[in-house]
Amino acid sequence: MSNIGKQPVNIPDGVNVNIKDNNISIKGKLGELNTNFNPTISIEIKDNLVYVKRPNDSRTSRELHGLYRALINNMVKGVSDGFSKELHMNGVGYTAELKNTFLMINAGYSHAVYLEIPIGINIEVPNATTILIKGIDKQNVGDVAAKIRQIRKPEPYKGKGIKYSDERIRRKAGKTVGGAA
């Protein structure tokens, strides 16, 4: 049996879980999330715990078992606590600024890059070189963070670029200047 799939998901106070047909909706203090699941997987609620069960040991059943348990767990965490990612900008003149529903990023190009903030995502800029992305859907938060990082990935020689707060950049030695012969 799947090690992840066999663990029940705890439902904290203030979170409601509803299962109807092949749809599970989870509502909490921060919002509501719902998803469709495969009808071969059964989901049950008992004593503030969500159990995910599979019908047999086929490969697809085993894959879906752990997948849906993880998705449900992320949905419960999202509506109760939320998810966040922090990005740091390194480089001379690299700045970020909020303009209405857009995030303006100066990342060493000849022009500023504007990124529209999607619905359900909250972006904060505590200082000019730090970007905080918050939301209830873990996948959306990660996608927006990856899009922002894609604007200027960190390079290994000087470390300039946009990086995650916990990311370590492997630095390379620069080209050594040899004497002219």
Image: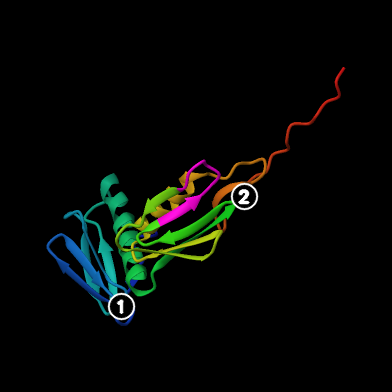
Give left or right: position of 111 versus 81: right
Q: Residues within 10 Å of mark 2 (few under 14, many from 20)?
A: some
Q: Which mark is residue 29?
A: 1
Type of residue at label 2?
Gly
- Reply yes or no: does residue 105 show up in magenta: yes
Type of residue at label 1?
Lys
Q: Report the colour scheme.
A: rainbow
- The quarter in which the C terminus is drawn is top right
Callout 1: SS: loop
Give left or right: position of 111 versus 52: right
Disc 1/disc 2 C-alpha distance (Å): 39 Å
Q: Earlier in the sequence, mark 1 or mark 2?
A: 1
Q: Nearer the viewer, residue 32 or 22?
A: 32
Q: Residue at x 19, y 53 (%)?
A: 38
Q: What range of the chain is rendered magenta? A: 103-112
Callout 2: SS: loop
Furthest-top residue in view? Answer: 181
Task: Identify the residue position indicated by label 2 in the image.
Answer: 91
Percent of width and height locating residue 99: 40, 60
Percent of width and height locating residue 100: 36, 62
Q: Nearer the viewer, mark 1 or mark 2?
A: 2
Q: Quadrant of residue 98?
A: bottom left
In the displayed structure, 143 sits above or below 18; it is above
Give left or right: position of 125 versus 73: right
- The quarter in which the N terminus is drawn is bottom left
Q: Residues within 10 Å of mark 1 (few under 14, many from 20)?
A: some
Count of numbered circles on the image: 2
